[in-house]
Amino acid sequence: MPRLAVPLLAALALLAPTSPAGATDAAGETARPSARTSCVPDPLRSAHAFTGTVASTSADGRVAQVRTDDGRDVQVAGSPNPRPNTATSVDRSYATGTRYEFRPLNPASPYEDNICTATHEVAAAPAVPPGPPATTVSAGAFVTALVALGVVVLVGTAAAFLVPSRRRRNRRRRRRA
């Protein structure tokens, strides 16, 4: 072999993909080609964007049943050919329980998606802050309790002033008699 052929072959080996499209690695994950190899430089933006969480997947993770943040149940196909045991160079796979911002190619379910769109994983939906604690007392009962408390305070204050005043009067009467 000529001297130049060995470095050339080594360089070509480094540039070649490590696994063919659709092959599985040691962890059982399907190898996906990078978006650069089959897509335009910038991911496609969609006017039909929505966010949602993947409830389940099929077709090797390329078809997702999604619960959108606005409460709809939709289907998203991450491949132009979503049949099992098939693969294309633009397949996107989804993970169950993961929240995504979907940027599909079409406006209705089943949505079409692939690795050339701007679909991406996003943080989990913000937790809804807990509401005020449930009360077992109605507003009318609360007002009644406040009025009753006011009456008790008023009667107690009046008694505090009247009782000592009568005692003083009675003492004066006894002294005079």
Image: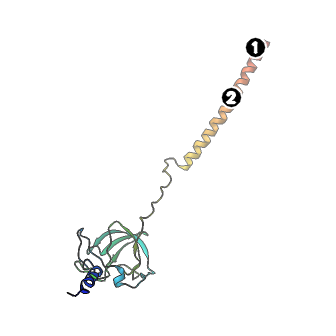
Task: Classify 19 as above or below 124.
Answer: below
Q: Residues within 10 Å of mark 1 (few under 14, many from 20)?
A: few
Residue 81 occupies quadrant = bottom left
| Residue at which label 2 appears | 160
Residue 165 rendering spot, x and y as whole percentages: 73, 24
Residue 176 occupies quadrant = top right
Mark 1 belongs to which amino acid?
Arg
Q: How crowded is mark 2: few (under 14 residues within 10 Å), some or many (20 or more)?
A: few
Residue in the foreground of this view, choosing between 26 and 103: 26
Q: Classify the position of the N terminus by image quarter.
A: bottom left
Q: Which of marks 1 and 2 is in front?
A: 2
Q: Is residue 19 left or right of residue 46?
A: left
Residue 174 rendering spot, x and y as whole percentages: 75, 14
| Residue at the image position 77 percent from the left and 17 percent from the top | 172
| Residue at which label 1 appears | 174
Mark 2 belongs to which amino acid?
Ala
Q: Classify the position of the C terminus by image quarter.
A: top right
The span from disc 1 to disc 2 (Cα, nearest Å) is: 22 Å
Residue 41 rendering spot, x and y as whole percentages: 41, 84
Q: In this view, does 129 lie to the left or right of 104?
A: right
Residue in the foreground of this view, choosing between 15 and 77: 15
